[in-house]
Image (cartoon, rainbow, N blue to C red):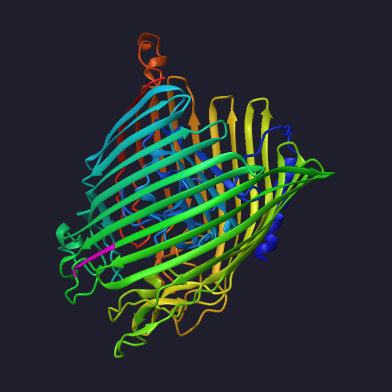
């Protein structure tokens, strides 16, 4: 019944679109890595006049949900179409950011002012990118030097909670190459007010208490160096060095800390702090005409170094048995080659495509576990078949990946001794097929089916045995498939409505064997949960009215649940076996009005309630967040025409409704509006 309703809604929407008075003459944007996939492309440079983050931009993408683990500057991850964050592959200039020890990529460590483009591929990309791309792929491309000549760009920001930020970029380009260097810094004391409402006792109504969150401060620095060297008419070298570091406090958990006469220091943990550093280096060689196609060879190294101090386990980060410090070092080296063939015509058929091969080696060393290693070898064939002058395009694909993971030590029970174990390194075969039907100029029908797989990360396999929490080396990889169908319309519009874009799709994901952290007796550990399913629909619309008012909205409905939960695991509470952190309904809306000198804008995000964790009754309530701002361009005033055109002043507020929200761990966020003031200037 659920699938029938979603299908009927999509059919009605298609009929309305096809019956609309707009001519379909626009051009559809496609993901170059996976053209048939439903994707969203974000031009990050369009947000240069705002204090925006990667998380905020991804929150506006249909099907994508950002999970925040604290306020500004705290760890943030993303899920797509009901997937876990570990099931979304994030790449920065082709380098994987997903942690081999933790699984997910931290979006808060990517400054938006260093980003040029964000491409979100929903439900696709597995054959091309290998394992971990179960929910989708996010491709982040950093900025390059501007056009010929020297250019500079700088901005300063200040706001509530003693937030301070700034960035600067310098670039130069000529006939033989180009170079770009950037630096950005963001910090905040981050103490904010929040409300706690303990459960009611008896017939008395619950009373709300106000506190100030302490030890949520952070300071981050990041730098980017990119260069291109032209080597002949068809060849070039590209080099990237990306550095990032953050120091932050950890306010801990409020669970179990409340009492009516508690002080702020009692509710927050003020003793823990964390440090994190990441470095990325990448060198690529590209030749546009090698063996009848375009060839690229790229090598990269990523290093992640982190440390957490929690004296005596007071902040609930570890056991109280004296372990109060942990550190880890992760290094990943990758070599990848790609060859894209030139199109070849054979009657009414045109053939093209690409082949990719890669080698990846990862090591993780931590203070409380043995050194862990994994070697992965992958290859994929991605042909494209075009029929009838492109009216029908087919995208069959096949990817394969083998891996070798080091053994580790584990015990079957607390009373048992540690013993060596081997992991499941199944070969991943990833077939896929996609299709695009060009119904009319600007109107496409799309369909996809893709096999997907994710290997357990090192924490899931080898988490040190703390008695109440440990890893599970016997885990089987997550395997399943994705399917979706829908349409994309890009129209030039007519009359007062221009640049019309409509996209709608139905999706389904079947997981043969999922992985979740569950309470198994008295031990919290990752377990295989059996089959699971996610069904849903996505709708995205946008247009520009009267050439000045830009409007956009998305709606996502996701019904994700376990099909045959193990009653001995975590489903004995009687709660429906739904996926955690997946709201049934999510809505976003945005508007921007170009008044030449002024540009007011606003954004709205709504999510229905969702569960914090598998099998628990605690639910996060439905929440609506409204943000708004104003951009001022003084050079467009006649009296100030002597000022640079790229000089802008802006002010914006987050959570204008002062709604008390919680993060993905159920911890309180600020109930106050965060105001930010910003100035930005750039050379022409």
Question: Could one spot residue 649 in this view of the protein?
Answer: no
621 left or right of 121? left
| 554 w.r.t. 3: above or below | above
| 240 w.r.t. 563: above or below | above
Q: Main secondary structure of the magenta part?
A: strand
Instruction: Specify the quadrant of the image occupied by residue 496.
Output: top right
- Judged from this view, the residue extending furthest toward the top is 639
Q: Residue at x 32, y 45 (%)?
A: 243
Return the residue nearer the eye: 389 or 283.
Answer: 283
| 53 w.r.t. 173: above or below | below
Region of the chain picked out in magenta, as a range: 324-328
Which percent across, then down, holds residue 15? 75, 45
Quarter holding the N terminus is bottom right
Q: Residue at x 26, y 67 (%)?
A: 255
| Residue 326 magenta-highlighted | yes
Q: Residue at x 63, y 51 (%)?
A: 37
Which percent across, then down, holds residue 26? 68, 33
């Amino acid at each position: 019944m659920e699938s029938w309703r979603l299908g009927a809604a999509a059919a009605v929407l298609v009929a309305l679109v096809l019956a609309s008075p707009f001519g379909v003459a626009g051009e559809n944007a496609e993901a170059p890595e996976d053209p048939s996939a439903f994707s969203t492309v974000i031009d990050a440079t369009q947000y240069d006049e705002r204090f925006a983050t990667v998380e905020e931009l991804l929150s506006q993408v249909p099907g994508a949900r950002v999970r925040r683990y604290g306020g500004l500057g705290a760890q943030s991850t993303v899920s797509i179409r009901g997937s876990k964050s570990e099931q979304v592959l994030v790449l920065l200039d082709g380098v994987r950011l997903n942690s081999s020890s933790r699984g997910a990529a931290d979006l808060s460590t990517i400054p938006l002012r260093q980003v040029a483009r964000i491409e979100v591929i929903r439900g696709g990309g597995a054959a091309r990118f290998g394992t971990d791309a179960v929910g989708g792929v996010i491709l982040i491309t950093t900025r390059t030097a501007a056009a010929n000549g020297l250019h500079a760009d700088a901005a300063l920001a200040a706001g509530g909670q003693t937030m301070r930020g700034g960035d600067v970029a310098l670039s130069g380009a000529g006939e033989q190459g180009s170079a770009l260097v950037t630096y950005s810094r963001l910090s905040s004391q981050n103490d904010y007010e929040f409300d706690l409402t303990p459960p009611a006792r008896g017939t008395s109504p619950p009373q709300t208490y106000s506190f100030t969150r302490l030890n949520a401060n952070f300071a981050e620095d990041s730098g980017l160096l990119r260069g291109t060297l032209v080597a002949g008419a068809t060849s070039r070298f590209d080099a990237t060095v990306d550095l990032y570091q953050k120091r932050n406090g950890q306010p801990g958990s409020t669970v179990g800390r409340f009492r009516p006469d508690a002080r702020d220091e009692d509710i927050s943990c003020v003793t823990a702090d964390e440090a994190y550093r990441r470095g990325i280096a990448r060198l690529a060689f590209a030749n546009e005409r090698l063996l009848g196609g375009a060839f690229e060879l790229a090598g990269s190294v990523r290093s992640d170094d982190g440390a957490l101090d929690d004296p005596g386990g007071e902040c609930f980060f570890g056991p109280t048995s004296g372990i109060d410090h942990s550190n880890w070092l992760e290094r990943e080296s990758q070599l990848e080659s790609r060859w894209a063939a030139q199109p070849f015509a054979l009657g009414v058929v045109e053939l093209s495509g690409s082949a990719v091969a890669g080698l990846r080696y990862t090591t993780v060393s931590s203070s409380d576990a043995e050194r862990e290693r994994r070697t992965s070898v992958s290859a994929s064939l991605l042909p494209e078949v075009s029929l009838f002058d492109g009216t029908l395009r087919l995208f069959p694909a096949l990817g394969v990946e083998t891996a070798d993971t080091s053994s580790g030590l584990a015990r079957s029970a607390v009373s048992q001794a540690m013993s060596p174990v081997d992991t499941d390194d199944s070969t991943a075969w990833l077939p896929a097929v996609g299709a695009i039907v060009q119904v009319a100029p600007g109107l496409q029908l799309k369909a996809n089916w893709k096999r997907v797989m994710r290997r357990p990360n090192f924490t899931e396999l080898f988490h040190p045995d703390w008695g109440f929490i440990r890893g599970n080396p016997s885990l089987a990889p997550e395997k399943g498939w994705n399917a979706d169908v829908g349409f994309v319309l890009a129209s030039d519009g007519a009359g007062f409505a221009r640049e019309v874009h409509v996209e709608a799709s139905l999706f389904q994901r079947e997981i043969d064997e999922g992985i979740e952290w569950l309470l198994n007796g008295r031990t919290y550990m990752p377990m295989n949960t059996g089959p699971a399913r996610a069904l849903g629909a996505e709708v995205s619309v946008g247009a520009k009215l009267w050439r000045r008012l830009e409007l956009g909205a998305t709606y996502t409905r996701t019904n994700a649940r376990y099909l045959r939960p193990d009653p001995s695991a975590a489903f004995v509470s009687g709660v429906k076996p739904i996926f955690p952190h997946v709201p049934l309904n999510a809505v976003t809306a945005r508007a921007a009005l170009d008044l030449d000198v002024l540009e007011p804008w606003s954004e709205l995000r709504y999510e229905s309630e969702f569960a914090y964790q598998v099998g628990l009754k605690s639910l996060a309530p439905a929440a609506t967040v409204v943000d708004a701002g104003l951009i001022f361009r003084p050079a467009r005033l006649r009296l100030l025409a002597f000022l640079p055109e790229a000089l802008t002043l802006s002010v914006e507020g987050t959570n204008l409704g002062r709604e008390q929200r919680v993060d993905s761990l159920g911890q309180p966020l600020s109930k106050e509006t965060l105001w930010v003031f910003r100035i930005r200037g750039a050379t022409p």
